[in-house]
């Protein structure tokens, strides 16, 4: 699985590939030398990396199946927990973390996951909010790691940015939407949604012809052969009632 981004590609990798950057980035944020999570040995755990065309590792993230029990409700199940999201210095602010999160979300949706959650630093809350997450707990202190908040999002609800990225790209022709009035019989056309619409003047002329035919039928007058829809032998317009 891979997704091409600006100057890098996101793909699923083995746990051994993500641990060096975990140590480099998260170790500098107070995590020390610990780069292994208990979930690393879980078969449901998946690891994603952002790599440049030259093979340089610039971002990593880990996700595993775990329902959220912490924080406020509502609690959606099944859930997945995001861990070890780290971006190499010099690549921050270039969409690496966003691309990694999107890869995790897509992988979760493909497996029927309903909720994505994790412990986010309070300094990074704006980033999580932009990607559809909300705070579901009070701020708590993690010894040696700073202030954190539990964040979660419903994967069924797309953000505006995700909806925009799913729209057809420029240059691709989108099929026209059916006219809701197409259910009515377009003058002389077939019934059904998407029936062709005539110009207003042509539609009025055909409606007039239909009324004339109806009037002629009721009066027992047959149209002259080959004279067209508007020419009837012996036809006279009805007198309008006084106002």
Image (tube, helix red, strand yellow):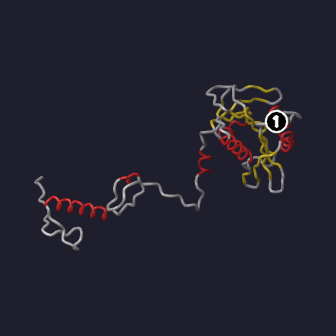
| Extreme residue in the bottom direction | 226
Q: Residue at x 65, y 38 (%)?
A: 112
Q: Where residue 11 appears, x then y in whole percent?
A: 76, 49
Q: How many marks?
A: 1
What residue did someone put label 1 on?
40
Q: Where residue 161 appears, x then y in whole percent?
A: 62, 47
Residue 144 in the figure: left or right of residue 113: right
Frontmost residue, 147 versus 154: 154
Q: Give the SS element for disc 1.
A: helix
Q: Residue at x 64, y 33 (%)?
A: 134
Residue 190 in the figure: left or right of residue 129: left
Q: Residue at x 82, y 26 (%)?
A: 143
Q: Where residue 211 appears, x then y in whole percent?
A: 22, 59
Reply above or below: 170 against 18: below
Q: Where residue 37 appears, x then y in whole percent?
A: 82, 33
- Mark 1 closeness class: few <14, some 14–19, many ≥20 residues within 10 Å: some
């Amino acid at each position: 699985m891979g997704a091409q981004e600006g100057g890098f590609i996101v793909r699923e990798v083995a746990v051994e590939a993500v641990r060096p950057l975990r140590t480099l980035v998260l170790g500098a944020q107070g995590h020390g030398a610990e780069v292994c999570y208990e979930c690393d040995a879980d078969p449901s755990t998946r690891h994603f990396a952002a790599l440049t065309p030259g093979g340089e590792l610039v971002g990593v993230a880990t996700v595993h199946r775990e329902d959220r029990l912490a924080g406020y409700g509502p609690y959606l199940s099944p859930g997945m927990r995001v861990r070890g999201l780290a971006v190499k210095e010099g690549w921050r602010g270039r969409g690496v973390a966003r691309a990694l999160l999107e890869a995790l979300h897509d992988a979760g949706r493909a497996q029927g996951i309903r909720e994505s959650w994790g412990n986010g630093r309070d300094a990074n809350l704006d980033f999580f909010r932009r990607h559809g997450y909300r705070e579901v707990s009070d701020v708590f202190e993690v010894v040696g790691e700073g202030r954190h908040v539990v964040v979660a999002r419903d994967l069924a609800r797309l953000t505006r940015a995700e909806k925009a990225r799913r729209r057809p790209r420029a240059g691709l022709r989108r099929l026209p939407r059916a006219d809701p009035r197409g259910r009515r019989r377009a003058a002389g056309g077939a019934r059904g949604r998407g029936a062709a619409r005539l110009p207003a003047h042509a539609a009025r002329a055909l409606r007039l012809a239909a009324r004339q035919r109806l009037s002629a039928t009721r009066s027992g007058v047959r149209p002259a052969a080959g004279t067209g829809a508007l020419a009837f032998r012996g036809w006279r317009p009805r007198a309008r009632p006084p106002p």
